[in-house]
Image (tube, rainbow, N blue to C red):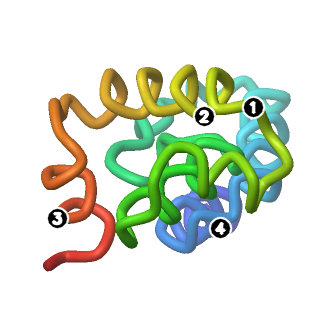
Amino acid sequence: SHLRTALESFDDLGADPWARTTAAELEATGEKVARREASGAASLTPQELQVSLLLAEGRTTRETAAALFLSPKTVEYHLRKVYTKLDIHSRAELAEQLLGS
């Protein structure tokens, strides 16, 4: 019961490494672990999140690329992935999802 409680807490906090370790321990006891799927900004990789936040603030693709030492094509690649994960289609929707404005 302690491991199940810990897993719920780690999931709520977004502490993925701890949640994965706890889930592995639970599975080692023979218990079946149903993990929650990350949604929204939590489903983004760190790089996707960085790119998204800069773009949501109103920076251009080139400005974002320069700030992160990436090529503009790499920024566009990450942006396409973000649009798919968040099921959005514009930078306005991106700003609304991430910044709430």
Q: Nearer the viewer, mark 3 or mark 1?
A: 1
Q: Secondary structure at mark 1?
A: loop
**x, y percent for residue 39:** 35, 43
Q: Is residue 68 above or below residue 31?
A: below
Compared across the picture, whether 74 is left or right of 4 comes to: right
Sooner in the amino-acid sequence: mark 3 or mark 1: 1
Check residue 26 in the rendering and tell me which mark sits there, or answer none.
Answer: none
- Give the tally of numbered discs: 4
Which residue is drawn at the image coordinates 46% and 23% (left, top)?
81
Compared across the picture, whether 71 is left or right of 99 comes to: right
Which amino acid type is shown beneath numbered disc 4? Ala
Q: Nearer the viewer, mark 3 or mark 2?
A: 2
Dot 3 surroundings within 10 Å: few (below 14), some, or many (20 or more)? few
Sooner in the amino-acid sequence: mark 4 or mark 1: 4
Q: Is residue 65 above or below residue 8?
A: above
The answer to whether the residues at label 4 and label 3 have Cβ atoms under 8 Å apart is no
Q: Nearer the viewer, mark 4 or mark 3?
A: 3
Rounded to the nearest angstrom, the CA distance separating label 1 from label 2 is 7 Å
Rounded to the nearest angstrom, the CA distance separating label 3 from label 1 is 25 Å
Dot 2 surroundings within 10 Å: few (below 14), some, or many (20 or more)? many
Q: Please give the residue where the numbered disc 2 appears in the rendered image.
A: 75
Which residue is drawn at the image coordinates 45% and 63% (left, top)?
59
**x, y percent for residue 51:** 58, 50
Which amino acid type is shown beneath numbered disc 2? Val
